[in-house]
Amino acid sequence: MKLLPSCHDVQTELTEYAEGALPLSRRIGIRLHLLFCRVCAGFLRGLKALPGLAKHALAPPSAPPEAAVKALADMQAVLSKQKAP
């Protein structure tokens, strides 16, 4: 890889760059490229945002939807009727 890598080179190693897993010479080259290339810098921002987006998407809802609340109430009513003698 040259000192100033191409977009293809940068995008191929962007994950390793973000994780700090590349040798110093490659990190410097990618950092220089990112200073001049808005596209690759945008890819890096997106890559860094993924864990937070995934955590948010997989988090349980803060309040159950109305349909779930109604279904739970209906199920509790059925179960309470079955327990009654």
Image (tube, rainbow, N blue to C red):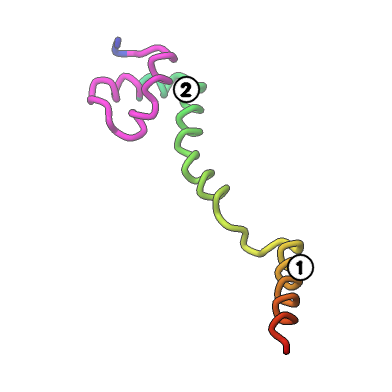
Residue at position x 72%, y 71% from top?
A: 75
Q: Work out whether residue 10 or residue 71 is closer to the camera in this orientation and state it.
A: 71
Badge 2 local density, few (<14 within 10 Å), some, or many (20+)? many
Q: Residue furthest front?
A: 85
Q: Which residue is mark 1?
A: 70
Q: Amino acid at mark 1?
A: Lys
Q: Which residue is pictured at 76% across the width and 62% down the height? A: 67
With 36 as the anchor, is 24 left or right in this view?
Answer: left
Closer to the observer: label 2 or label 1? Answer: 1
Q: Residue furthest left?
A: 24
Q: Locate residue 12, reporting x and y percent.
A: 40, 19
Q: Is residue 71 left or right of residue 50?
A: right
- Residue 23: quadrant of the picture: top left
**Whole-percent x, y for residue 17 in the image:** 34, 28
Task: Please tell me whether mark 2 sits on a helix, a strand or a loop.
Answer: helix
Q: Position of residue 21 (x, y in %)?
A: 27, 31
Residue 30 picture location, percent across and down: 35, 21
| Left-right relation of 41 to 70 | left
* Principal secondary structure, stretch drawn in magenta: helix
Which residue, as the protein is rendered here, is positioned at the far bottom?
85
Q: Which residues are magenta?
A: 4-30
Distance of mark 2 from mark 1, alpha carbons?
A: 48 Å
Please name the amino acid that badge 2 sits on. Answer: Cys
Quadrant of residue 10 within the rendered picture:
top left
Is 68 included in the stretch rendered in magenta?
A: no
Relative vertical location of residue 49 with respect to residue 44 in this rendering, above or below: below
Does the magenta segment cover residue 5?
Answer: yes
Is 80 drawn above or below residue 36 in the view shown? below
Quadrant of image for the N terminus: top left
| Quadrant for the C terminus in the image | bottom right
Residue matched to label 2: 40
